[in-house]
């Protein structure tokens, strides 16, 4: 399972990279705005900085919603760095653009996916990644993990190569459940990854080992 961090915060991206388990980064316009990164030039420069920190894929989202606009923006983003994956919304024009990018060998992440039907379309169009938002489904009393399981079943039925990128992950249990279901990738905050570290028996066990060692020294 690949671990992506879902942020545009460079310090957090560096911290995750230093942990040694980071496979990539996802961003979106809201995450950019949260870091005060606005305006096309600043956003482009920020993507370049992220690519310098991490070794893996970096999703960069288009703003256009018409086919020509998505293609123009996506081609510009893809040229920025070989690690860039063009993030395209799950809309009719987006699906057409994903098919276009797929034919051209440009990698894509189909975002804002909330149903298995949408995920099926994204795979048919040749998306590299599909991003079902599990946390946002949980927020409206709909089990986001069921969606991951449905997409896994459908993709396995037909051997689709589109990778399931469980997005809108909010905590460590989301990661574990997605791993059990077989999501290919998860993206979430650093806290959700670091939460996997924690166990009270590890803490008490280590404290005892150190105390016993110190008795003899
Ligand atoms: C996906 O790539 C999105 O950036 C993201 O996971 C959205 O998460 P949120 O629902 O916590 O905003």
Image: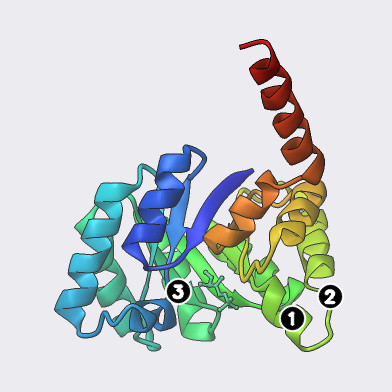
Please give the residue where the numbered disc 2 appears in the rendered image: 143
Residue 137 got which mark? Answer: 1
Badge 2 or badge 1: first in the primary sequence: 1
SS state under label 3: strand
Nearer to us of marks 3 and 1 is 1
| In this rendering, position of residue 115 left or right of residue 108 | right
For the residues bearing labels 2 and 3, Cβ distance under 8 angstroms? no
Q: Position of residue 111 (x, y in %)?
A: 54, 73
Answer few, some or many: residues within 10 Å of disc 2's Cα (few below 14, many 20 plus, some between 14 and 19).
some
Residue at disc 2, secondary structure: loop
Q: Is residue 82 visible?
A: no
Tag 3 residue: 88
Between the residue at mark 2 and the residue at mark 1, the CA separation in whole angstroms equals 6 Å
> As displayed, is residue 20 above or below residue 33?
above
Q: Residue at x 61, y 66 (%)?
A: 167
Is the N terminus in the top left, top right, bottom left or bottom right quadrant?
A: top right
Say few, some or many: other residues with alpha carbon within 10 Å of mark 3 (under 14 / 14 to 19 / 20 or more).
many
């Amino acid at each position: 399972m690949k671990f992506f961090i879902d942020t545009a915060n460079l310090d957090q991206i560096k911290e995750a990279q230093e942990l040694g388990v980071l496979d990539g980064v996802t961003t979106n316009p809201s995450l950019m705005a949260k870091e005060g990164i606005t305006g096309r030039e600043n956003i482009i420069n920020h993507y370049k900085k992220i690519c310098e920190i991490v070794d893996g894929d970096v999703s960069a989202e288009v703003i256009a919603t018409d086919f020509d606009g998505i293609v123009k923006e996506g081609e510009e983003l893809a040229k920025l760095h070989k690690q860039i994956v063009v993030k395209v919304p799950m809309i009719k024009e987006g699906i057409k653009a994903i098919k276009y990018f797929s034919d051209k060998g440009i990698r894509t992440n189909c975002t804002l996916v909330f149903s298995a039907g949408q995920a099926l379309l994204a795979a048919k169009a040749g998306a590299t990644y599909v991003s079902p938002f599990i946390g946002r489904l949980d927020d409206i009393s709909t089990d986001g993990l069921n969606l991951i399981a449905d997409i896994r079943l459908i993709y396995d039925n037909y051997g689709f190569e589109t990778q399931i990128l469980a997005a809108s992950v909010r905590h460590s249990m989301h990661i574990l459940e997605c791993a059990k279901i077989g999501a290919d990738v998860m993206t979430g905050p650093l806290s959700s990854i670091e939460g996997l570290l924690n166990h009270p028996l590890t803490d008490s066990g280590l404290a005892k080992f150190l105390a016993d060692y110190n008795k003899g020294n």
